[in-house]
């Protein structure tokens, strides 16, 4: 698939930032990471690392959207259970049929959610299980951005995903 030069540059920058964050955390070398090409306007607004190696990273995008990448050890929820606990009242829930990402068990779901201010969001969750870890991709876009446009952009990000375990890579 042909990606524009800015999109390739954004992908490289995201990969490098994740790589540099990983180098500083020795326990991460044995834990997988989910790499994804984010739009060039992505700005990291949250980067929380836990002592056990789990993490949450959130990137703000234009138009009020955000992407969150998470890694959890021993995550025992299904995506429908996650939706029930975090997005109570979700509507138009549909399962996405994705090929395994990097050969790992992959589940994906797309739905809409209306918050207490009557703002509607289009949300996609992807969970990739790699050993004892679950890597989660969460995209949240205001519906005013247009369902077709949002789904096309999110699908492009999902297609760019790969899982890498630093201890098994040839990067160092």
Image: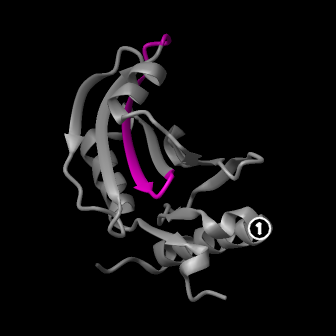
**Above-or-below relation of 84 to 24:** above
The answer to whether any part of residue 40 appears in the image is no
Please rate how many residues cluster around mark 1, counting C-alpha atoms within 10 Å: few if below 14, some from 14 to 19, many from 20.
few
The residue at 65%/75% (across/down) is 16
Badge 1 element? helix
How many discs appear?
A: 1
| Position of residue 27 measured from the top left corner of the image (x, y, whole percent) | 72, 63
Q: Quadrant of residue 94?
A: top left
Per the rendered image, the range of residues in magenta is: 116-133
**Does 52 sit left or right of 61 as displayed?**
right
**Does 19 sit left or right of 24 as displayed?**
left
The residue at 36%/35% (across/down) is 79
Is 85 within the magenta?
no
Q: Quadrant of residue 142?
A: top left
Q: Quadrant of residue 108?
A: top left
- Please identify the quadrant where the N terminus is shown: bottom left
Which residue position holds label 1?
A: 26
- Please identify the quadrant where the C terminus is shown: bottom right
**Above-or-below relation of 96 to 40:** above
Depth check: 36 or 102 in front?
Answer: 102
| Position of residue 101 measured from the top left corner of the image (x, y, whole percent) | 34, 64
| Position of residue 8 measured from the top left corner of the image (x, y, whole percent) | 48, 77
The answer to whether any part of residue 35 appears in the image is yes
**Does 8 sit left or right of 113 as displayed?**
right
The residue at 23%/61% (across/down) is 99
Majority SS type along the magenta span:
strand
The residue at 68%/64% (across/down) is 28
Is 126 within the magenta?
yes
């Amino acid at each position: 698939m042909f990606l524009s030069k800015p999109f390739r540059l954004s992908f490289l920058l995201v990969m490098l930032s994740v790589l540099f964050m990983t180098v500083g955390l020795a326990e991460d070398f044995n834990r997988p990471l989910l790499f994804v090409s984010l739009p060039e306007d992505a700005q990291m607004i949250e980067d929380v690392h836990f002592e056990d190696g789990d993490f949450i990273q959130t990137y703000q995008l234009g138009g009020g959207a955000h992407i969150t990448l998470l890694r959890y050890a021993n995550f025992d929820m299904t995506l429908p259970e996650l939706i029930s606990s975090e997005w109570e009242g979700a509507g138009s829930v549909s399962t996405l049929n994705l090929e395994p990402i990097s050969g790992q068990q992959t589940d994906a779901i797309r739905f809409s959610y209306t918050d207490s201010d009557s703002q509607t969001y289009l949300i996609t969750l992807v969970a990739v299980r790699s050993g004892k870890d679950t890597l989660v991709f969460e995209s949240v876009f205001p519906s005013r951005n247009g369902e077709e446009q949002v789904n096309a952009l999110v699908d492009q990000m999902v297609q760019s995903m790969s899982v890498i375990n630093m201890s098994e890579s040839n990067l160092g």
